[in-house]
């Protein structure tokens, strides 16, 4: 039987997280290939509905990766994103879905290793939870 490989959706800030993903690629730092990166101008623009829709559409886990607190290009976007992730987590819990399927994290622009670590950790945590109950 084939081992379960979780589908992870990563909403990534254009200024920090996407730059870190690019740095990881240039440095040939490996991270799980099952992640799908969605570029957003600012994680503050990611809405609770986007997070829930990703889970509903079959993602086993969703991670929002933005700038370090106090370093957001749009001043407070990362703070707004973290609050939206927390709100979405509570809604998932109400629906009987593990909060561990959703996460907020941050990475500095040149942080290729940290980006890879975030994706790897998220993949391992979701793998431990198993396939999403909404995945078809």
Image: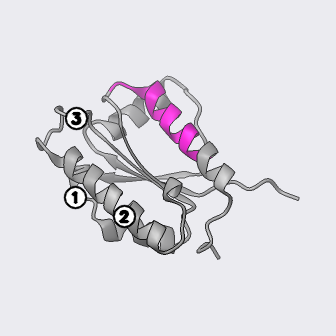
Which residue is the site of mark 3? Answer: 69
Neighbour tally class for label 1: few under 14, some 14-19, many 20 plus, Cα within 10 Å? some
Q: CA distance from mark 2 to mark 3?
A: 20 Å
Residue 119 visible at all: yes
Residue 48 coordinates in the image, percent (x, y): 31, 66
Residue positioned 56% across, 38% down in the render: 121
Residue 41 visible at all: no
Q: Quadrant of the C terminus?
A: bottom right
Q: Kindly indicate the quadrant of the structure image that contains residue 109.
A: top left
Neighbour tally class for label 3: few under 14, some 14-19, many 20 plus, Cα within 10 Å? few
Task: Give the left or right position of residue 48, taking residue 79 as reference.
Answer: right
Q: Quadrant of the N terminus?
A: bottom right
Task: Give the left or right position of residue 66, taking residue 79 as reference.
Answer: right
Magenta residues, as a range?
Answer: 110-123
Judged from this view, the residue extending furthest toward the left is: 75
Please report contact status of discs 3 and 1: CB closer than 8 Å, yes or no.
no
Does 86 appear above or below 134?
Answer: above
Q: Secondary structure at mark 3?
A: loop
Q: Earlier in the sequence, mark 2 or mark 3?
A: 3
Q: CA distance from mark 3 to mark 1?
A: 16 Å
Residue positioned 27% across, 44% down in the render: 14
Residue positioned 39% across, 64% down in the render: 90
Task: Give the left or right position of residue 76, taking residue 111 as reference.
Answer: left
Residue 108 coordinates in the image, percent (x, y): 31, 29
Residue 6 coordinates in the image, percent (x, y): 63, 55
The majority secondary structure of the magenta stretch comes to: helix
Residue 125 coordinates in the image, percent (x, y): 60, 46
Q: CA distance from mark 2 to mark 1?
A: 14 Å
Q: Secondary structure at mark 2?
A: helix
Which residue is the site of mark 1? Answer: 45
Residue 88: mark: 2
């Amino acid at each position: 039987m084939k081992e379960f490989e979780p589908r992870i959706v990563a909403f990534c800030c254009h200024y920090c997280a996407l730059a870190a993903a690019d740095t990881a690629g240039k440095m040939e730092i490996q991270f799980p290939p099952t992640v799908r990166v969605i570029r957003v101008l600012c994680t503050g623009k990611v809405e609770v509905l986007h997070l829930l829709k990703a889970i509903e559409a079959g993602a086993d886990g969703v991670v929002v990766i933005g700038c370090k607190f106090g370093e957001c290009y749009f001043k407070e976007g990362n703070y707004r994103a973290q609050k939206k992730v927390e709100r979405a987590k509570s809604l998932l819990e109400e629906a009987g879905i593990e909060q561990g399927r959703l996460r907020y994290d941050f990475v500095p622009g040149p942080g290729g290793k940290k980006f890879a670590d975030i994706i790897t950790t998220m993949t391992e945590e979701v793998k431990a939870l198993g396939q999403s109950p909404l995945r078809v």
